[in-house]
Amino acid sequence: MSTRPSRKAVPAIAGGTPVRSRPLPFFRAAVDESDVAAVSDTLRSGWLTSGPKAVELEARLGAYLGTSNTIAVSSCSEAMLLCLKALGIGAGDEVITSPITFASTVHAILHNGATPVLADIETDTFGVDPAQVRRLVTPRTKALLPVHFGGQACRIEEIIAIGDKAGIPVVEDAAHSFGARVHDRQLGRFGRATTFSFYATKNLTSAEGGAITTEDDALAHRLRLLGYHGMSRDSWSRYSDQGSWYYEVQIPGYKCNLSDLHAALGLSQLAKIDTLLERRRAVAEGLSRALGGCGGIELPLEYPGNRHTWHLYVIRLRLEALRIGRDEFIRALRAENVGTSVHFIPIYRHPFFHPYLQAGSTFPKSEDYYARCISLPIFPDMTDDDVRDVGEAVTRIADHFRAS
Ligand SMILES: Cc1ncc(COP(=O)(O)O)c(C=O)c1O
C-alpha cells in the first residue's frame, strides 16, 4: 500500500504547507447503496420498530459469532446496564473495570447502585492488567467488567480464570471489538455475557445499536424481559400473523430494543463484515509501514494469539524524544488537515467519578498512556493516498519537533 514518507518538510503549524489541502476526518462510516436499499426496503415494509429484521439480525449475529443466545439492543451502554442488573448486581457490590474506557462502562455499574473499582491497564492490549484485577478482588467484588480496547481482546483468558477462581461472573465490554478473536475463538463466548456496540463508528454499525451474547439460557431470558418493559411478549410476537394481543409484565423493565430500521442497516453491514475488517487491517498495516521509520512514536501491536480488528489505531508519542507534548502534536496534525481523537480520558479524571475514587489508588500505566496517546484516522474507505498522507504528516511533525 503506502511507501515510507520521503519528504522532509516544515510542518504547517511551523509555517509549512499542509500535507493535505482538504481535511481527512478521523472517521467516516462505510455506507454504500446496499445499505441504503436495505433501510429503504424496511421503511417501505410498514414495520419500523423491532420485528422480523431484528429477529434476523440476532440469528445472523449468532451464526457469525457461534453464540447460542444473541440479543439485539439499542446500545452497548444499555447492554452493560442490563447484564449487571440481570446478574443481580446492586448496592454494596463492587465491579472491577478499566479506567481506559468510555464513561458508560462505569455508568452501567453506578446506575445499578454498585461501586466501580478501577484496575490499572497493561500496555500490551491496553486492557486491565490481570495482576491488578487479582489484587483488587475482595468478598464484595460481584462482577468483572473488562474492556476489549480498540479492536483486540484484553487478556481475557487470565481474567476469566480470576473470575472462575473467585466465583465471580465476567461481563465483557466488547464495544470496539466485534469480530476479534483469541486463539481463533471469537469474542462473545468467553465470559458470562459479552456486549457489543453498533454505534456509527464501530466495526459493525447499525447507526445506533448493540448486542448481548451469552451461553446462559436463563440469563438470556432475564435479559430479554428486562430489556423490553419486563413484558412476556414483544410487539412483533403480538402483532404478527400468529400473534395474540395478550401479554404480562413480569418485572419492572427498561426499553432497550433495537428497531427494524437499525437492524436492516446492521444486517446489510454484517453481510460484508469480513471485507470491512480486512480493509481496516490493510489500513492499519499501511499506517504501520508508513510510520515504521518514525523515531518519535510507538506503534500499536497485535498481542500474540489475538486477531485484532483495528477499530482504533493508537500511536503513543515518545515524549523524551520530542520537544512537544500530545496536545501540541494533535494541533500540529490538525494544521496538516489530519483528524485525530483521544481514547480515552481516563475515567478517574472525569468529575462524575471523583466521589468514587478509592483513597490511595494510583494508575501509573493509564496516566503514562493518556499523556502519550493519539488515535489516528482508520476507517474502511480510507484510500492508499489518505494512509500515505497520515504517515507523512506524523513523520513530518515528529522529525521537526525531535528533541536535540
Ligand atoms: C469502550 C466502550 N464501551 C461502551 C461504549 C458504548 O457504546 P454505545 O455507544 O453503543 O452505547 C463505547 C462507545 O463508544 C465504548 O467506546
Image (cartoon, rainbow, N blue to C red):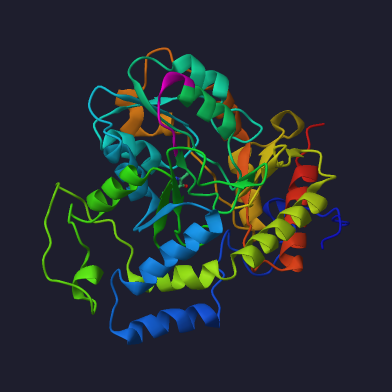
Q: Residue at x 15, y 46 (%)?
A: 251
Look at the image and say whether residue 387 sits in the magenta stretch. Answer: no
Answer whether residue 201 is visible to the viewer in this image.
no
For the magenta stretch, what is the residue range? Answer: 165-171
- Camera-side residue of 285 and 159: 159
Position of residue 395 relative to residue 41, above or below, is above
Asked which quadrant contains residue 48, the reply is bottom left
Toward the right, the furthest residue is 6
- Camera-side residue of 241 and 182: 241
- Camera-side residue of 139 and 208: 139
Give the x, y percent position of residue 89. 28, 31
Q: Residue at x 35, y 57 (%)?
A: 73
Toward the bottom, the furthest residue is 44
Answer whether residue 90 is visible to the viewer in this image.
yes
Q: Residue at x 29, y 60 (%)?
A: 257
Position of residue 329 relative to residue 1, above or below, is above
Give the x, y percent position of residue 105. 39, 40
**Is residue 80 left or right of 365 when viewed as pictured?**
left
**Quadrant the C terminus occupies:** top right
Asked which quadrant contains residue 124, the reply is top right
Give the x, y percent position of residue 37. 47, 84
Count of numbered tags: 0
Look at the image and say whether residue 169 sits in the magenta stretch. Answer: yes
Toward the front, the furthest residue is 242
- Camera-side residue of 56 and 298: 56
Give the x, y percent position of residue 177. 55, 49
Q: Residue at x 67, y 41 (%)?
A: 183
**Quadrant the N terminus occupies:** bottom right
**Is residue 176 left or right of 19 when viewed as pictured?**
left
